[in-house]
Image (cartoon, coloured by chain):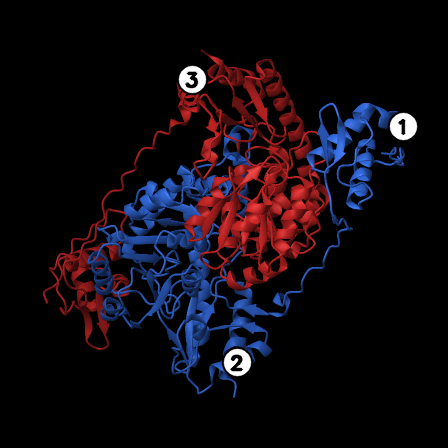
Chain colours: A red, B blue
Amino acid sequence: MEMLSIHLDRSIDTPLYEQIYLYIKKEIINSHLSYGEKLPSKRKLSEFLEVSQNTIETAFDQLVAEGYIESKPRKGYFVLAQGDLEYIYQERQTTSAKNTSEDEIKYDFYPSRIDTEAFPFDQWRKYVKQMIDKQHHQLLLLGNAQGDVELREEIANYLYHARGIHCDRESIIVGAGVETLLQQLISLFSKQTLFGIEDPGYQLILHIVKHFGHQAFPLEMDDQGIIIEKLEKANPTLIYVTPSHHFPYGSVLSINRRNQLLQWAENKQQRYIIEDDYDSEFRYTGKTIPPLKSMDTNDRVIYLGSFSKSLIPSLRISYMILPKQLLHFFNDKLSFYHSTVSRIDQQVLALFMKNGDFEKHLNRMRKIYRRKLELVLELIKPYHPIIQLIGEQSGLHIVCEVRNGKTEQEILENAKKAKLKIYPITAYTATDWSTERPQFIIGFAGIPYKHLQHAFELFLNICLSK
Amino acid sequence: MEMLSIHLDRSIDTPLYEQIYLYIKKEIINSHLSYGEKLPSKRKLSEFLEVSQNTIETAFDQLVAEGYIESKPRKGYFVLAQGDLEYIYQERQTTSAKNTSEDEIKYDFYPSRIDTEAFPFDQWRKYVKQMIDKQHHQLLLLGNAQGDVELREEIANYLYHARGIHCDRESIIVGAGVETLLQQLISLFSKQTLFGIEDPGYQLILHIVKHFGHQAFPLEMDDQGIIIEKLEKANPTLIYVTPSHHFPYGSVLSINRRNQLLQWAENKQQRYIIEDDYDSEFRYTGKTIPPLKSMDTNDRVIYLGSFSKSLIPSLRISYMILPKQLLHFFNDKLSFYHSTVSRIDQQVLALFMKNGDFEKHLNRMRKIYRRKLELVLELIKPYHPIIQLIGEQSGLHIVCEVRNGKTEQEILENAKKAKLKIYPITAYTATDWSTERPQFIIGFAGIPYKHLQHAFELFLNICLSK
C-alpha cells in the first residue's frame, strides 16, 4: 500500500498517537482502506511521519484492540474491518429540564409526605462524618446480602422494644424500599400464586404482584377488618394486610380477626400473611398496637417495615422479617443479589439508632404530627356532620367524607382550580367499589404547620361551597 | 361483673393507664374475662382504684383500639375478644454473630474486588457534609423514579467524554446495583422471552433471567467473539455481551462482529443487545474501546454501567441507558417503583463528578492498577509458557492457564491448603464446557501492592510445585 499521508497537528492537545489512530480508523470506516490491505510497517510510518516508533505502536495497538486491524507475526498489520461502518460521534446536546407541574400546586395532601423541617441534620451529619473515614475502608466493599449486621441488630432491638416483636437479626432483610423487598419476596413463589389484597388498600402491592405474573384478588372488608369467611372461600396463598392502621381507612384490625387470620394461615402449609406495619410509629394516644408478628407463634407472618415515614423517604431503607422457611428460600434462590442499600447509609442509620437519636426523633415527630392533627380536627369540627371523619386518628393522614350531595368529580375539579392536590378513596381500590358519598384521603404531615390552617380552609371551602 | 382487683404499682416507671391496660388484656387472653362480659364503668373503676377517670379512659381506649373490648353508647364497655389468645412476649435473646470463614483466607483473588486504600475519603466527606444540610430538606422527599436529574446529567456527560456515547439524560435509569436494574429490565419482557448469554460469562445474568421465568441459552464464541451464525440460528430476543472487555477472558469484540451484532438486532423488531461495559474505565494503554452503544444508530443497545468498580462497590449505584421504546415501557409498566438509590448519595456522586473528582480518581486508580498489573506480569513472565496469560491486559483481573499437566482440582486443593481463594474459569460457564488445560481468573486489584508479590508467589508455587 501507499504511505498514509496523515496530517499531524502538533499544536493541539490530542496526542500524536491518537491523531494517527483516528485517521486510520476513519479511513477504514470510509472504506478508503479495505479488508486485507496491508498497513505500512511501524518503522516506515514512523520515519515518514517523523514520530517515534512507540507512537505508531500505541496507535496500532489501539486499532488491534478494537478489531480494526490485525497483527500477523513477521508479516505486519492488515485491515480487518469491512463494510459500511457507521461511527457517529456528534457534539453532545443537553436537553433542557422537563417542566414539572409541581410548581403549580399550592398544597399537596399526598398521604405519604412527611415533615422535612424537623429532620436532625446535625446529628445525621455527625454520624456520616464518623463513618466516611479511612479507618472504615472495608465498608467500601460489598457487605452481607441481607444487610449489615449492625443495622439488623438495631432493627431487631427497635422491633422488640417498640413493637413487641421477638425476632432474630438473621431473619431480617434490609432493602432499597418496600417495593424492592416485595418484588424479591414475590419472586420466591411460583408463578400463578394467588394473593389476597385489602381493598380499598395500598395499590402498589397489587401492581407488583400483577407485573410479576401472579394473580391477585381484592379482600372484602367490614368495619372489623377482613371478612374471614370470604378469605377461606377464595383460598389465596398470601394475603397482604395493614392490621395496625388500615390503609387508607385507619381502622385497627380487631383481636378476634387477628387470631382468625393467624389461624387461617396455620390451617394449611405455605400460607403466609404479609403484615405492612407502615406508620405504626405514629399513634398519638395510648400505646401502639401490637402487630400480628408479635402473636405469630407459628412463623406465618412476613413483617414489612420502613424508615420512609419515620425518618427519610429518600433514604430508601426498608426491611422485612422472613419466616424461617422463606428465609431459607431467599438465601438459596436469591443468592445472586447483593444488598440494595449503601453500606455507609446502613452504618449511619445503625449508629443513629444505637445512640438513641432515632427514638428521640420519633418522639419529636410524634409531637409535631399530633399538633398538626389536632389543628386539623379543630378546623373540621364545626362542619360535622357535613364533613365526617373516618377511622382512627393516628398516622399521617385522615379520611374525610363529604355529606352535602357534592360529587367526587365536582370536588376534584374545584381542588384543581384552587391548586390543591387531594386524593379520592376511589384511587385506592382495584375494583369498581365506591362509597355512597365522596371520601378523600388527606395527608396532613407534609404541610408545614404555618400553612396548615390555610391549606385546610381551602380544602373545606371546596367541599362546602355552594 | 365484679370489680377488677388490679394491683397498681406507683413506684415503677410503667404509667398507671398501661398497668390497667396490661392487666385487663392479660385477663382477656387468659379467658378470665370472657366474650360479652361487661367491664365496670370508668367512674366506678376510677373510684375503686383511686386513679383519675382519664387514666381509665386511656386504658380503655387502647383496649378498644386493639379490639379487645368495645364501647356501646350509653351501655358501657364489653369484652370483645374470645378464644385462646396467645401473646408471647419473652425477653429478647440476641444471637451471636456467625463466624465467617473470611478470616481464614489469606488472599482472595476475587475478580470484582477493588483497591480500597486509595479512596478519596476527604473529598467524598466534603460533598456529603455539603448535601446534608437544612437548606436541602427537599432532598429528604422522594425524587425522580429514574434517578435525580443532576446525577443523570453527570453520567451523560461522562459517557460522552469517556465513552463516546451520545445519550440523553432522560434515557438513563439509576438503580441500586446492576442486578436490580437487570431485574427491572427483564420484567419488561413477556415470560418465556429467550436470552442469549456469553458463555463463559457473567453468571449473574443467567441466574436472574432464569429466576424470573425466562429462558436463556449460552452464546458460543470463538476468538473474535460471538459466532453470528449460531446466534441467527438460536434466534433470541435479547443477548447479553461484554464487548469492550469480555468477561472473563478479557478479549475485545472485533469491529466486524460489532457491526454484525448491531445488524442482527436491526434485522428484526424487538431485538436488543445488553451491553455490559463493566470495567471499561481500566484500560492501561491507548484509548478505551468505543462501546457498541456509541455505534448504535438504531437504538437497539441497552447499556449497563456501574460505579462499583470505578468508585465504591458498597455504594450500590449503577445505571442503564434504555432505548426509547423500552424507556416508554419502563415508565409505563414500572411506574410503581421509586428510585432504589438514596437521593443524598446520588447528589454527592453528582457533585463528585461535576467537580472533576471522579476523573481524578479514575486516573489515580488507573495508575495504581497498572502498577499492580505490571508487577503481576513481571512475576509470571519467567514461567512462560507453563503459565500462559490469556486475553487483553486491561481491567482488574487476568486469566492464567496452567500448562504442566496439573488438573484444576489439584490446584484448587492446594490453593485451599495455602489459604488462597482462586476462581477457576469453569465456575463461569453454564454448560459443561471446559478447557483442555486448567484456567483461573485472578483478580489482582483488591490485594494491597505490598502483599501482591507474596500473594502471587504463593499462587505460582501452587501451580508449579511438583
Q: Which mark is residue B462?
A: 2
Q: Position of residue B341 (x, y in %)?
A: 48, 45
Query: Which amino acid, mark 1?
Result: Phe
Q: Secondary structure at mark 1?
A: helix
Work out whether residue B192 or residue A160 is closer to the camera in this orientation and state it.
B192
Residue count near mark 1 (Cα–Cα under 10 Å), binned few <14, some 14–19, many ≥20: some
Quarter of the picture holding the N terminus of chain B: top right
The amino acid marked with disc number 2 is Ile
Residue occupied by mark 3: A418
10 Å crowding of disc 3: few (<14), some (14-19), many (20+) = some
Find the distance from the CA under tag 3 to the CA under tag 2. Answer: 77 Å
Residue A47 shown left or right of residue A168 in the figure? left
Callout 3: residue from which chain? A
Cα distance in 3D space between marks 1 and 3: 55 Å
- Which residue is rendered at x = 37% and y = 29% of the image? A100
Pick whichever, A374 or A273, lies toward us: A273
Q: Which mark is residue A42?
A: none
Q: Pointer 2 and pointer 1: residues touching (CB < 8 Å)?
A: no
Q: Which chain is disc 1 placed on?
A: B
Residue at mark 1: B48
Chain letter of mark 2 equals: B
Q: Position of residue B10 (x, y in %)?
A: 89, 33
Q: Give the left or right position of residue A337, taking residue B87 as reference.
A: left
**Closer to us: mark 3 or mark 2?**
3
**For the residue labelled by badge 2, is the local secondary structure a helix, a strand or a loop?**
helix
